[in-house]
């Protein structure tokens, strides 16, 4: 498949995935320059990326089954619904994982203080 054979329909069908991939790459690059105190910014950016992907999915969604990328990509309304649900679940799990990581870090800090005070 040459780049000249990619149509607007192909790009529209894959727009949510393209957006999410680009956002993930940008977030990873930003995360490289953040220090530990500002690491929460990458967390917020990842939630914004998921919300943006849901918005792109809603804006570019199809109403009927549509085939693109020379028959290798199929989009339909149920697939779009599942994408939006997956973005929501991902955002919820991301929030849960962050809270869990903070609790584990707090417990490890307490254990380290106890062990250093006992020595």
Image (cartoon, rainbow, N blue to C red):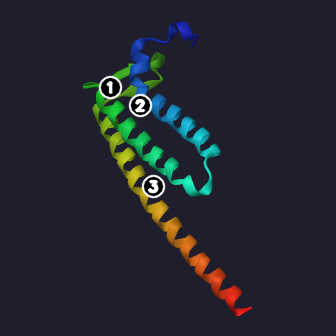
Sort mark 2 into few (<14), some (14-19) or many (20+) by Cα contacts within 10 Å.
Answer: many
Q: Is residue 27 above or below residue 1?
A: below
Mark 1 touching mark 2, by CB under 8 A? yes
Task: Pinpoint residue 11: horizontal percent, then vertical percent.
Answer: 44, 19
Dot 3 or dot 1, earlier in sequence: 1
Q: Nearer the viewer, mark 3 or mark 1?
A: 3
Q: Is residue 22 above or below residue 40?
A: above
Q: Nearer the viewer, residue 14 or 70?
A: 14
Q: Is residue 92 above or below residue 60?
A: below
Residue 82 lies left or right of residue 1; in this view the side is left
> Element under label 2?
helix
Q: Which residue is mark 1?
A: 60
Q: Quadrant of the C terminus?
A: bottom right
Task: Pinpoint residue 14: horizontal percent, then vertical percent.
Answer: 43, 26
- Quadrant of residue 7 in the image? top left
Q: Which residue is mark 3?
A: 94
Q: Which residue is mark 2?
A: 16
Residue 20 lies left or right of residue 84; in this view the side is right
| Residue at x 57% of width, y 13% of height | 1
């Amino acid at each position: 498949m040459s780049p000249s054979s990619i149509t607007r329909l192909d790009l529209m069908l894959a727009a949510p995935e393209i957006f999410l991939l680009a956002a993930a790459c940008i977030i990873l690059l930003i995360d490289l320059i953040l220090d530990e105190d500002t690491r929460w910014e990458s967390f917020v950016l990842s939630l914004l990326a998921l919300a943006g992907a849901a918005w792109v999915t809603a804006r570019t969604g199809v109403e009927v089954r549509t085939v693109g990328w020379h028959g290798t990509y199929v989009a339909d309304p149920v697939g779009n619904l599942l994408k939006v649900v997956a973005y929501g679940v991902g955002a919820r799990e991301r929030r849960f994982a962050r809270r869990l990581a903070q609790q584990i870090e707090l417990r490890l800090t307490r254990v380290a203080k106890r062990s250093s005070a006992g020595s």
